[in-house]
Amino acid sequence: MRAHIKSWGTKIIGARSLDLVRFHWTKWRLRKRNRAFIHKHPDLVLPPPYMLYEAYKIDYPSYYHQGRKTASWVLELASRHAELAEATILDWGCGPARVTRHLSEFLPQATIHGTDYNADTISWCQAHIPSISFRQNKVQPPTSYKSQQFDMVFGISIFTHLSLENHRAWLQELHRVLCPGGILLLTTHGEVFRQKLTEGERTLFDQGIIVVRTLDQEGHRTCSAFQPPDAFESYARPYFDVIEHLPGKVESWGLAQDTWLLRRKQH
């Protein structure tokens, strides 16, 4: 019922308008917390508020500390299956470098890249984090990277904002830029997010169909995709072998996305 009301209200008000209202409210609500963090870390370069909100949330302590924690988590999972000390790694959909900026701390000999479709975000990253190579991509593939350039690619909550057509297209492109046997780490909206769907969407989800709620621009936070695990695996199977699938759970802070560790097939 709540999902139906939210969907109905969003259509009336407009996804972007509602999102801007949410942005200003969140910015005001967290103003003291963010000011205190800036005062404590005057030399730390931080992204503009809306850029941060669009990619994550307007919470500077969380952006920095949780970003570092996520970087450690990504590398810990991937290192179970690959040697990463001198790897070439791509953060696909890097946003304002929440995770990317920390990777060199853990892997000082690795080569780190970041890419995102948002031109303003990439310009900010290039200007403020020059130690990492950043490039802009488009919502649709291909990227400008060479074939078999990367030992590892990861994308945190990227497929969760893509159209059905781009699920297959991006899996094919990520296969292209990864070395044979390379590792791909992705997150999706799995079974635990079923509660967020309307009745009609749940029916499709239960039939094993990926549900795309296209309220606005693809790639933006107002476009959401929900992936039944079997359906996502069927899209990935032509290009990747599944090494691990970690279903999301209800956590104290909210719903955790599914995590997929995939290995690029040799062909």
Image: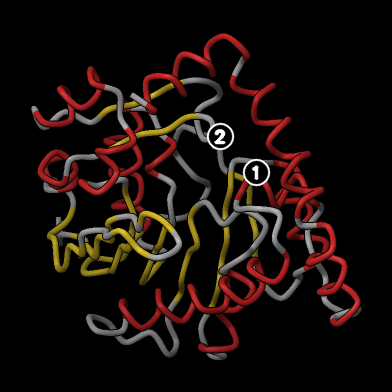
| Residue at the spot 78% in from the left edge and 55% down from the top edge | 124
Q: Nearer the viewer, residue 26 or 89?
A: 26
Determine whether 57 is above or below 131 in the image.
Answer: above
Circle 1 is placed at which residue position? 54
The C terminus - image quarter: bottom left
Residue drawn at the location 61% of the way across and 49% of the way down:
55
The amino acid on which the numbered mark 1 sits, given as a three-letter code, is Glu
User: Quarter of the image holding residue 172?
Assistant: top left
Query: What residue is rendered at 46% in x and 74% in y?
Result: 88
Label 1 or label 2, whichever comes before in sequence order: 1
Q: Looking at the picture, how far across and down is residue 69, in whole percent?
A: 51, 78
Residue 86 x %, y %: 45, 87
Please state if 155 lies on the left or on the right of 55 as rendered: left
Q: Nearer the viewer, residue 245 or 142?
A: 245
> Mark 2 Cα within 10 Å, few/some/many (few <14, many 20+)?
many
The answer to the question of whether label 1 and label 2 lie on touching residues, with beta carbons closer than 8 A, is: yes
Q: Residue 220: which disc?
A: 2
Q: How is the image coloured?
A: secondary structure
What amino acid is labelled 2 in the image? Answer: His
Q: Residue at x 45, y 62 (%)?
A: 253
- Badge 1 crowding class, 10 Å Cα cut-off, few under 14, some 14 to 19, many 20 or more, is some
Percent of width and height locating residue 74? 40, 74
Label 2: state its secondary structure: loop
Q: Any mark on residue 175, and which?
A: none
**Displayed quadrant of residue 163:** top left
Question: Position of 21 compared to 237: left or right?
Answer: right
Horizontal side of residue 163 vs 230, given as left or right: right
Q: Spatial distance from mark 1 to mark 2, Cα to Cα? A: 7 Å
